[in-house]
Amino acid sequence: MEFLLTLIIQIVVIIIASRAIGLVFRKIHQPQVVGEMVAGIILGPSVLGLFAPHAFAFIFPPNSLKYLNTLSQLGLLLFMFIVGLELDPKLLKGRGHAAVLISHVSIILPFILGTILSLYLYPLLSNNSITFTAFALFMGASMSITAFPVLARILSEKNLIKTKVGAVTIACAAVDDVTAWSILAVVVTVVRAGSDKIPVWLTISGSVVFILIMIFTVRPIISKLEIYYHNKGDKVTNDILGLVLLLMLASAWTTEWLGIHALFGAFFMGAMMPRNKYFLNDIVDKLNDVTIVLLLPIFFALTGLNTSLGLISGPDMWFYFALILSSAVIGKLGGSTISARITSLSWRESAGLGILMNTRGLMELIILSIGLELGVISHALFTMMVLMALVTTFMTTPFFEWVYPAKLIRKELEEADKEKHKFRILIPVSFPSSGPGLLKIANALAPVNDFKIYALHLLKPGDLSISKITEENGNQKNTEALQPLLNFAEDNSIPVKTLSFATRNAAVDINQIAVIKGVNTIIMGWHKPILTKSILSGTVNEVIRNAKADVCVYLERKFNPIKNILVPFREGVHDKGALAIAHQIAIKNNALVTLLHIVKQENNHKNNIQNEKDGNIEFTEDHVKLRLVESDTPLDTAIKIANDNFDLVVVGLSETWGLEPSFFSIRHERFSSECMASLLIFRKFIADKNSWL
Amino acid sequence: MKIIFLYIILVGILFVALLGILKIGETIKAPIDVSGKWNVNNEFAKEISSSCTPVYLPIKNPGFLIDQSGIHLTLIFNDAAKTEMHGILEKDSIFFSNNFTLSQGNFKGQDRKAQVNFSVDVLQHGGNVYQLKGAWLTPNCGNNDIINFSAVR
């Protein structure tokens, strides 16, 4: 089983390289796929083969590549199946005509440029075993591709899905996907025409029959899967998954036998699956991770093994590459931009759309590998086209940021939310179970009328499937992490607006969203950090330090209604703020606040208490009572009293109470660990205009 | 209606142009196909291993693979080191020429190079390439070694 030993080593090396290099590229805000493409090239003859030929020969001996190739083909089948599953006709709602026009112009123009370029390149880079028509059609098709998955992820990471340019781009890319793969099916048929394998007439007629059977017979039958799914409690069981995979493989086998490549069958079967969003999401969830983490990197590695930069030697070859790159960029970017402008998008929006449509990513590599497999393109031309795919995908993010800077995106989002006068609270929810407690506190401290609560869930970009990226914002059923909060909101008639965003830096995005939405108070739950014991480190620390709003950190320990509130008070703006919000909570919940004023022994500060009226808070007998205690150890005293039958302790963020934010603290926060009551830690945002004390 | 009109103008016209380009391209001729695995005759194999060529190249099995990108060819010998030579195809002849560092015997490790030329004629029948014939030349080898060879695919 020597092949197995080699195969395992290969897979280990490939996964390490793709994750490590992918991480480096994510750090510079490039999509993971760019890193994986580069990882593949590094593992190939261009880098590893050149600088460490013995290691290269040991890891990738030629006779072992057929096993890797099998796994990579399986990965591609699953990937194309997932792409088909995630195709959503609803994306075209309201913009179908414009999307089709923009998409088809963005295909035909680079296609034309590719075929014109073929007039020059065919006698230089091809040979007489390939007809000009096959070569030109293939070049045209490979120039006109857009990577819908990468594009969708870029839009999601920039939170542009809900903007006009994002919505139109997604719709265009979806149309692009279907059209380009259909064209490629025709091209593959033309290329394979005349081969002994299967006659052209059989391929064409067989494909037509196949499509008709799929749409009118297979699709109605497999729609019954949805009923079976419901009967299993809205879960994709292993039986359902097994059946789905069998259908995909059967479809892939059929199209491969017909001569139009197995990938079309996999894609088509994905598109034929029942369009129930939960069903599709469940299947994608089950297939996505293994495909993306294990199988697709193998494909990237094999692409890299076929990519030999040494073949592009000499000025002539680099000149051909320059021609290919410019035709691809001018055709796709230019075609998309002009046609988008004609459909009345602004120049900036059109340019943004054009840049996004110029992304080629993994889809381009798939087409190129088909071309290499069919012998339409040589290794040198394959290498040039791979570089073209890499460059066009890499340039998308920085060019898009140049045309569509983050400030502009923020302005668009701000303009969408014109209500400036309500009291606004933002609740970032990380753990679903913390949602109800946070909402309870938010509702408790909000004014009786005229307030707005936002529940925010932040997602890591790599965790998202396309259907989750493109689903409607505010669709409460689809936001699993916020479901307990939403259930609590519904039970208690608390109006909540949900927000979901992809994020690379949760703290930065929380602070930015707070500014965009004009939030007065951010309420966060306790996130237990990995390396410290402090609850005020990590993301919480960054929010406390940088948020332009008041910040509360809530630890829920008691779940009964809030009736007794303790506010330890010494001095300072945060303690005053804690008192104010405790008072607000007490008013709304008909609770009692005990103001625990701890003074040093031998000093009497009663006069200072009267001065608290400067904070415009009236102390009434119903809601606040004062308890004056002399103590030289205020923290010990406060903790001891706090454990005396209080439901909630509201405490200002200060060193007096052993609470001070630190990035990497190992200091033990006694209040958080020894206090039995629920704890609300308050940090006042100090700004001249925005204080609400 | 406006969108449909624009579609016909933008996409339709370009589609017609595409058909025109494909028609024009049918008249263009591509270089002959010499790619693939080639097996050389036994005499060449014997002579090349007994000549001074191994001083330059450790070729024991001189069978080779040609990787073709149009007129740009890469010849890869079927030896352990996968020795490569690059060449250009002009009509029906190929000229490979590379500089190699001395690899064996008294010259091993010394910074001495020699130019190896490999001149190949492509023989066709009915448009199909069936044989390569030519000469392998390693000058600066004492005697100018010219070794004739032939190879079939």
Image (cartoon, helix red, strand yellow):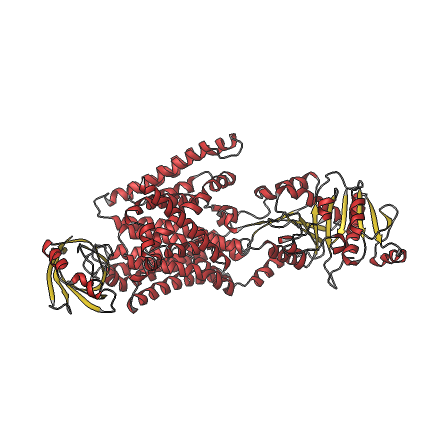
Residue A519 position within the rendered picture, expressed as x and y whole percent measured from the top left: 68, 55
Q: Quadrant of the C terminus of chain A?
A: bottom right
Q: Quadrant of the N terminus of chain A?
A: top left
Please name whichever residue, B120 or A56, is drawn nearer the observer in this view of the structure: A56
Please name whichever residue, A164 or A51, is drawn nearer the observer in this view of the structure: A51
Residue A52 position within the rendered picture, expressed as x and y whole percent measured from the top left: 34, 57
Residue at x-position 40% and y-position 45%: A295
Please name whichever residue, A44 or A409, is drawn nearer the observer in this view of the structure: A44
In the image, farthest residue toward the front: B106
Please name whichever residue, A501 or B36, is drawn nearer the observer in this view of the structure: B36
Q: Is residue A605 visible?
A: yes
User: A197 left or right of A608?
Assistant: left
- Asked where in the image residue A476 lies, by quadrant, the reply is top right
Q: Is residue A263 visible?
A: no
- Asked where in the image residue A6 lies, by quadrant, the reply is top left
Residue A270 position within the rendered picture, expressed as x and y whole percent measured from the top left: 42, 41
User: B8 left or right of B40?
Assistant: right
In the image, farthest residue toward the top: A231
Q: How many marks?
A: 0
Residue A211 position within the rendered picture, expressed as x and y whole percent measured from the top left: 35, 41
Q: Is residue A400 above or below residue A81?
A: below
Residue at x-position 47% and y-position 46%: A89
User: A60 left or right of B7?
Assistant: left
